[in-house]
Image (cartoon, rainbow, N blue to C red):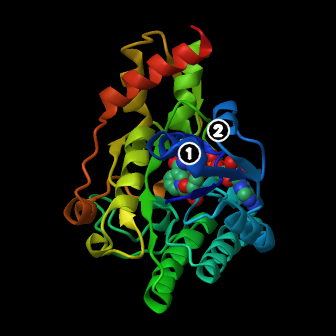
Amino acid sequence: MKKILVIGAAGQIGTDLTGELRSRHGGEQVVASDIKLAPEDVMQGGPFVKLDAMDNKKLEKIIDEYGITEIYHLAAILSGNAEKNPKWAWDLNMNSLFNVLDVSRAKGIQKIFWPSSMGAFGPTTPEWDTPQVTVMEPTTVYGISKLAGERWVEYYHTKYGMDIRSLRYPGLISYKTEAGGGTTDYAVEIFYQAIKCGKYECFLSEDIALPMMFMDDAVEATIQLMDAPSKDIRVRSSYNLGGISFTPRELADEIRKYIPELEVTYKPDFRQEIAESWPRRISDDAAQRDWGWQQQYDLEKMSRVMIEKIREKMGV
Ligand code: NAD
Ligand code: AKB
């Protein structure tokens, strides 16, 4: 029987993904782990263990103790935080991946999920409808670590026959857990600020389009990729996911349909340069072709659910 370990389960993706995996496989089948304690529902919904993803001995112990067969390795330092401390981010992003790959190889783990990002692209990548295979010259430490990670997961698959699967997520938008220090965080923060006080100061310019995705789509894509027959997985680095492309101004206009008084000011900081180095819109033709990927949320549907759920959460 499948027994799953989620590493980084307290984060933005981890909280949603752990919940969904538990509802599909049963709470006891999914062990959540993180270096810090997770939100209440993750702590209560099944086993939780403290784990530093760099600690190979503890990882081995957890795999043995729980009979783990699959690992979702989500722990990482995101783009904005990584630029503040590049060596630390490189160390965690790369060495936690090596740790998971090497321990998994030794323990015969059947399947691994590790996320890449649109951050693996760079300023020389075609910025509109970015294809699956293209120029990749990232200029951020985060992007460099994701591109290197993509090459390594393909290497471990080719050399050691390991079943590792990966997605290049766009910026993810969700209401359960705050975004974790990335360049696309504005698209989560703006909803909270709009509902809380009707004002938001955006750290990107109003006209920079970026690919984004609602969390339900991202979780569905992740599970669909992991459930696909191995013969259908033809990309062993990381699959593009397209998402929805919009600018901060377009998102603000959409939110104003619910909160007409919303005032947004724009004060671009160091993250503007990161955003400018990423694609404007990404093609996920390969994911559609290989394992039938179809996203469900557009800007309108995503914004409606975000407003409704955050209002509910804040009791407004
Ligand atoms: P997050 O920052 O919200 O969560 C990461 C989690 O990892 C945190 O709970 C943190 O406590 C944990 N962590 C940090 N160091 C750890 C360590 N040493 N050991 C164990 N846990 C540790 O990030 P997220 O948004 O949930 O992203 C998860 C993954 O998805 C990352 O690899 C990220 O690069 C990738 N990704 C995220 C997005 C996005 O928009 N959220 C987009 C593209 C890719
Ligand atoms: C970030 O902005 O760093 C992340 C990502 C797109 O990888 N949200």
Tell me where residue 142 sits by quadrant: bottom right
**In the orientation shown, which residue stands out farthest toward the left?**
289
Q: Nearer the viewer, residue 10 or 91?
A: 10
- SS category of the residue bearing label 1: helix
Tell me the tag on residue 42: 2
Q: Nearer the viewer, residue 272 or 75?
A: 75
Residue 308 to residue 56: above or below: above
Residue type at mark 2? Answer: Val
Q: Is mark 1 within 8 Å of ligand 1?
A: no
> Residue 273 in the image: x percent, y percent?
55, 55
Mark found first going from the N terminus, 1 or 2 = 1
Quarter of the picture containing the C terminus is top right
Distance from the alpha carbon under mark 1 to that under mark 2: 7 Å
Are the residues flagged by discs 1 and 2 in contact, CB closer than 8 Å?
A: yes
- Which residue corresponds to the image point at 76% horizontal and 68% vertical from the top-left? 61
Residue 247 to residue 50: above or below: above
- Left or right of 230? Residue 52 is right
Number of numbered callouts drawn: 2
- Left or right of 205? Residue 59 is right
> Residue 237 in the image: x percent, y percent?
42, 75
Neighbour tally class for label 1: few under 14, some 14-19, many 20 plus, Cα within 10 Å = many
- Which residue corresponds to the image point at 40% horizontal and 24% vertical from the top-left? 305
Give the labeled residue for mark 1: 18
Neighbour tally class for label 2: few under 14, some 14-19, many 20 plus, Cα within 10 Å = many
Look at the image and tell me whether residue 42 can be seen: yes
